Image (cartoon, rainbow, N blue to C red):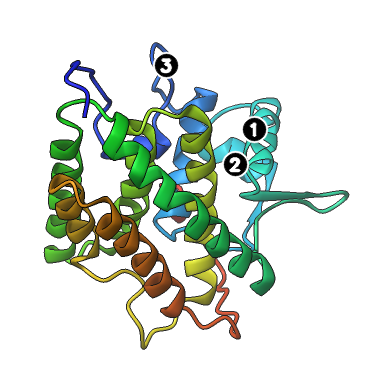
Amino acid sequence: MKTKQKTHRGHRGDIARTEPGRQRDLTDEDAIYGRILAAIFEHRLQPGTKLGEDRLARIFDVSRARIRRVLPRLAHEHLVTLEPNRGAFIAKPSVAEARDIFDARRLIEPGIVARFMQSAERGAVAKLREHVAAERKARAAGDNPAMIRLSGEFHVLMAKMAGNTMLARAMHELTSLTCLIIALYDSPAMPHCRSDEHAEIVDAISAGEKARATRLMVDHLNHVEQGLDLNIDQTAAVDLEQALA
Protein backbone atom coordinates (compact mmCIF):
# COMPACT_ATOMS: atom_id res chain seq x y z
CA MET A 1 0.00 0.00 0.00
CA LYS A 2 1.06 3.58 -0.51
CA THR A 3 2.70 5.38 2.38
CA LYS A 4 1.36 8.87 1.66
CA GLN A 5 -0.91 10.08 4.43
CA LYS A 6 -4.43 11.09 3.52
CA THR A 7 -7.30 12.18 5.71
CA HIS A 8 -10.70 10.55 5.24
CA ARG A 9 -13.92 11.54 6.91
CA GLY A 10 -15.05 9.37 9.80
CA HIS A 11 -17.28 6.45 8.99
CA ARG A 12 -20.17 7.15 11.34
CA GLY A 13 -23.03 8.39 9.20
CA ASP A 14 -20.60 8.86 6.32
CA ILE A 15 -23.10 7.94 3.62
CA ALA A 16 -25.50 10.57 4.84
CA ARG A 17 -22.92 13.32 5.36
CA THR A 18 -23.09 16.64 3.59
CA GLU A 19 -20.32 17.87 1.32
CA PRO A 20 -17.40 19.75 2.95
CA GLY A 21 -18.15 23.40 3.60
CA ARG A 22 -21.92 23.01 3.37
CA GLN A 23 -24.40 23.93 6.10
CA ARG A 24 -25.39 21.08 8.42
CA ASP A 25 -28.71 22.57 9.64
CA LEU A 26 -31.98 20.83 8.80
CA THR A 27 -32.93 23.35 6.12
CA ASP A 28 -29.88 22.55 4.01
CA GLU A 29 -30.77 20.34 1.04
CA ASP A 30 -27.80 18.04 1.67
CA ALA A 31 -28.91 17.63 5.28
CA ILE A 32 -32.48 16.79 4.20
CA TYR A 33 -31.12 14.30 1.67
CA GLY A 34 -28.88 12.83 4.37
CA ARG A 35 -31.71 12.44 6.86
CA ILE A 36 -33.88 10.60 4.34
CA LEU A 37 -30.95 8.44 3.25
CA ALA A 38 -30.08 7.54 6.85
CA ALA A 39 -33.71 6.58 7.47
CA ILE A 40 -33.54 4.26 4.44
CA PHE A 41 -30.28 2.71 5.65
CA GLU A 42 -31.65 2.15 9.13
CA HIS A 43 -34.92 0.67 7.81
CA ARG A 44 -37.00 3.44 9.36
CA LEU A 45 -38.37 4.24 5.90
CA GLN A 46 -39.74 1.11 4.28
CA PRO A 47 -40.01 0.43 0.53
CA GLY A 48 -43.22 1.86 -0.88
CA THR A 49 -43.54 4.64 1.74
CA LYS A 50 -45.08 7.79 0.27
CA LEU A 51 -42.92 10.92 0.62
CA GLY A 52 -45.54 13.65 0.48
CA GLU A 53 -44.07 17.06 -0.29
CA ASP A 54 -46.30 18.84 2.22
CA ARG A 55 -45.41 16.46 5.04
CA LEU A 56 -41.70 16.59 4.29
CA ALA A 57 -41.82 20.38 4.13
CA ARG A 58 -43.45 20.46 7.58
CA ILE A 59 -41.03 17.91 9.03
CA PHE A 60 -37.97 19.85 7.85
CA ASP A 61 -39.57 23.29 8.18
CA VAL A 62 -38.72 24.26 4.60
CA SER A 63 -40.61 25.16 1.45
CA ARG A 64 -42.05 22.54 -0.90
CA ALA A 65 -39.73 23.95 -3.57
CA ARG A 66 -36.73 22.83 -1.54
CA ILE A 67 -38.20 19.36 -1.08
CA ARG A 68 -38.78 19.19 -4.85
CA ARG A 69 -35.05 19.70 -5.37
CA VAL A 70 -34.15 16.86 -2.99
CA LEU A 71 -36.53 14.17 -4.27
CA PRO A 72 -35.13 14.04 -7.85
CA ARG A 73 -31.67 13.52 -6.38
CA LEU A 74 -32.91 10.43 -4.55
CA ALA A 75 -34.77 9.34 -7.68
CA HIS A 76 -31.57 9.67 -9.72
CA GLU A 77 -29.99 7.14 -7.33
CA HIS A 78 -33.03 4.84 -7.78
CA LEU A 79 -33.94 5.16 -4.09
CA VAL A 80 -37.18 7.02 -4.79
CA THR A 81 -39.69 6.64 -7.61
CA LEU A 82 -41.52 9.71 -8.89
CA GLU A 83 -44.99 8.82 -10.20
CA PRO A 84 -47.02 11.37 -12.20
CA ASN A 85 -50.13 12.55 -10.33
CA ARG A 86 -49.23 10.35 -7.36
CA GLY A 87 -45.98 11.76 -5.97
CA ALA A 88 -42.77 10.29 -4.59
CA PHE A 89 -42.36 6.87 -2.98
CA ILE A 90 -39.43 4.99 -1.48
CA ALA A 91 -38.35 2.56 -4.19
CA LYS A 92 -39.58 -1.00 -4.00
CA PRO A 93 -37.10 -3.22 -5.89
CA SER A 94 -38.55 -6.27 -7.57
CA VAL A 95 -37.18 -9.77 -7.04
CA ALA A 96 -35.47 -9.59 -10.45
CA GLU A 97 -33.89 -6.25 -9.52
CA ALA A 98 -32.75 -7.67 -6.19
CA ARG A 99 -30.99 -10.55 -7.91
CA ASP A 100 -29.44 -8.15 -10.45
CA ILE A 101 -28.07 -5.96 -7.67
CA PHE A 102 -26.40 -8.88 -5.92
CA ASP A 103 -24.99 -10.09 -9.25
CA ALA A 104 -23.55 -6.61 -9.84
CA ARG A 105 -22.02 -6.51 -6.38
CA ARG A 106 -20.40 -9.92 -6.84
CA LEU A 107 -18.75 -8.60 -10.01
CA ILE A 108 -17.69 -5.22 -8.61
CA GLU A 109 -16.65 -5.79 -5.02
CA PRO A 110 -13.82 -8.30 -5.55
CA GLY A 111 -12.25 -5.65 -7.80
CA ILE A 112 -12.70 -3.04 -5.06
CA VAL A 113 -10.92 -5.34 -2.60
CA ALA A 114 -8.05 -5.85 -5.05
CA ARG A 115 -7.76 -2.12 -5.78
CA PHE A 116 -7.91 -1.28 -2.09
CA MET A 117 -5.00 -3.64 -1.42
CA GLN A 118 -3.02 -2.08 -4.25
CA SER A 119 -3.83 1.60 -3.87
CA ALA A 120 -5.21 2.50 -0.44
CA GLU A 121 -3.19 4.91 1.69
CA ARG A 122 -1.39 3.89 4.85
CA GLY A 123 -3.81 3.70 7.72
CA ALA A 124 -6.72 2.58 5.56
CA VAL A 125 -6.81 -0.91 7.10
CA ALA A 126 -6.89 0.68 10.54
CA LYS A 127 -9.93 2.71 9.49
CA LEU A 128 -11.67 -0.49 8.38
CA ARG A 129 -10.85 -2.08 11.73
CA GLU A 130 -12.29 0.97 13.53
CA HIS A 131 -15.45 0.58 11.48
CA VAL A 132 -15.72 -3.13 12.29
CA ALA A 133 -15.29 -2.24 15.97
CA ALA A 134 -18.19 0.22 15.68
CA GLU A 135 -20.29 -2.55 14.11
CA ARG A 136 -19.49 -4.86 17.04
CA LYS A 137 -20.36 -2.15 19.54
CA ALA A 138 -23.73 -1.55 17.87
CA ARG A 139 -24.42 -5.28 17.76
CA ALA A 140 -23.50 -5.74 21.43
CA ALA A 141 -25.78 -2.83 22.37
CA GLY A 142 -28.65 -4.29 20.35
CA ASP A 143 -28.76 -1.11 18.26
CA ASN A 144 -30.20 -2.65 15.11
CA PRO A 145 -30.60 0.60 13.10
CA ALA A 146 -26.96 1.53 13.68
CA MET A 147 -25.84 -2.03 12.97
CA ILE A 148 -27.69 -2.08 9.64
CA ARG A 149 -26.33 1.32 8.63
CA LEU A 150 -22.75 0.50 9.63
CA SER A 151 -22.86 -2.84 7.80
CA GLY A 152 -23.70 -1.04 4.57
CA GLU A 153 -21.23 1.77 5.16
CA PHE A 154 -18.37 -0.75 5.48
CA HIS A 155 -18.58 -1.48 1.76
CA VAL A 156 -18.84 2.19 0.77
CA LEU A 157 -15.91 3.10 3.02
CA MET A 158 -13.69 0.49 1.38
CA ALA A 159 -14.69 1.69 -2.10
CA LYS A 160 -13.90 5.30 -1.19
CA MET A 161 -10.49 4.43 0.20
CA ALA A 162 -9.71 2.29 -2.85
CA GLY A 163 -9.32 5.59 -4.70
CA ASN A 164 -11.72 5.21 -7.62
CA THR A 165 -14.52 7.79 -7.66
CA MET A 166 -16.73 5.85 -10.06
CA LEU A 167 -16.50 2.67 -8.02
CA ALA A 168 -17.32 4.62 -4.86
CA ARG A 169 -20.41 6.12 -6.51
CA ALA A 170 -21.50 2.71 -7.75
CA MET A 171 -21.12 1.21 -4.28
CA HIS A 172 -23.04 4.09 -2.70
CA GLU A 173 -26.01 3.36 -4.96
CA LEU A 174 -25.78 -0.43 -4.79
CA THR A 175 -25.47 -0.45 -1.01
CA SER A 176 -28.44 1.89 -0.61
CA LEU A 177 -30.53 -0.34 -2.87
CA THR A 178 -29.39 -3.39 -0.91
CA CYS A 179 -30.77 -1.79 2.26
CA LEU A 180 -34.15 -1.44 0.56
CA ILE A 181 -33.99 -5.05 -0.59
CA ILE A 182 -33.20 -6.28 2.92
CA ALA A 183 -36.06 -4.20 4.33
CA LEU A 184 -38.43 -5.69 1.77
CA TYR A 185 -37.31 -9.33 1.65
CA ASP A 186 -35.58 -9.97 4.98
CA SER A 187 -36.21 -13.47 6.27
CA PRO A 188 -36.64 -13.53 10.07
CA ALA A 189 -35.17 -17.03 10.17
CA MET A 190 -31.84 -16.02 8.59
CA PRO A 191 -29.33 -13.31 9.64
CA HIS A 192 -28.59 -11.06 6.65
CA CYS A 193 -25.04 -10.25 7.76
CA ARG A 194 -22.95 -12.64 9.86
CA SER A 195 -21.16 -10.88 12.68
CA ASP A 196 -17.58 -11.86 11.86
CA GLU A 197 -17.46 -11.65 8.07
CA HIS A 198 -16.31 -8.03 7.74
CA ALA A 199 -13.55 -8.69 10.27
CA GLU A 200 -12.39 -11.76 8.33
CA ILE A 201 -12.22 -9.72 5.11
CA VAL A 202 -10.13 -7.05 6.85
CA ASP A 203 -7.82 -9.69 8.34
CA ALA A 204 -7.20 -11.20 4.89
CA ILE A 205 -6.51 -7.76 3.42
CA SER A 206 -4.10 -6.94 6.26
CA ALA A 207 -2.26 -10.23 5.65
CA GLY A 208 -1.90 -9.42 1.93
CA GLU A 209 -3.97 -12.46 0.94
CA LYS A 210 -5.79 -11.05 -2.07
CA ALA A 211 -7.31 -14.30 -3.30
CA ARG A 212 -8.67 -15.10 0.15
CA ALA A 213 -9.96 -11.56 0.70
CA THR A 214 -11.84 -11.48 -2.61
CA ARG A 215 -13.27 -14.96 -1.99
CA LEU A 216 -14.46 -13.90 1.47
CA MET A 217 -16.15 -10.85 -0.02
CA VAL A 218 -18.08 -12.97 -2.53
CA ASP A 219 -18.99 -15.46 0.20
CA HIS A 220 -20.22 -12.58 2.34
CA LEU A 221 -22.47 -11.24 -0.42
CA ASN A 222 -23.80 -14.74 -1.04
CA HIS A 223 -24.66 -15.08 2.65
CA VAL A 224 -26.49 -11.75 2.64
CA GLU A 225 -28.54 -12.80 -0.38
CA GLN A 226 -29.22 -16.22 1.12
CA GLY A 227 -30.61 -14.48 4.21
CA LEU A 228 -33.44 -13.06 2.11
CA ASP A 229 -36.74 -14.61 1.13
CA LEU A 230 -37.21 -13.33 -2.40
CA ASN A 231 -40.76 -14.62 -2.47
CA ILE A 232 -42.26 -12.40 0.22
CA ASP A 233 -43.35 -8.80 0.63
CA GLN A 234 -43.25 -7.54 4.21
CA THR A 235 -43.92 -3.86 3.51
CA ALA A 236 -45.51 -2.16 6.52
CA ALA A 237 -47.10 1.23 7.04
CA VAL A 238 -44.65 3.90 8.25
CA ASP A 239 -45.12 7.05 10.34
CA LEU A 240 -43.13 9.55 8.28
CA GLU A 241 -42.61 12.03 11.13
CA GLN A 242 -41.29 9.33 13.44
CA ALA A 243 -39.06 7.81 10.75
CA LEU A 244 -37.37 11.16 10.05
CA ALA A 245 -37.19 12.34 13.66
Which of the two residues, 23 or 11, is positioned nearer the viewer here? 11
- Which residue is disc 1 drawn over? 67
Label 2 vs 3, first from the N-terminus: 3
The relative height of residue 155 versus residue 139 in the rendered view (above or below) is: above
Which of the two residues, 155 or 240, is positioned nearer the viewer here? 155
The relative height of residue 169 versus residue 180 in the rendered view (above or below) is: above
Look at the image and tell me whether residue 45 can be seen. Answer: no
Q: Residue at x 29, y 63 (%)?
A: 216
Distance CA(mark 2)–CA(mark 3): 19 Å
Expressed as whole percent of the image width and height from the top left, the position of residue 2 reads 22, 23
Expressed as whole percent of the image width and height from the top left, the position of residue 82 reads 76, 47
Report the mark closest to the observer, 2 or 3.
Answer: 3
- Which residue is disc 3 drawn over? 23
Q: Residue at x 51, y 83 (%)?
A: 229
Residue 99 shown left or right of residue 134 in the figure: right
Q: Residue furthest bottom?
A: 189
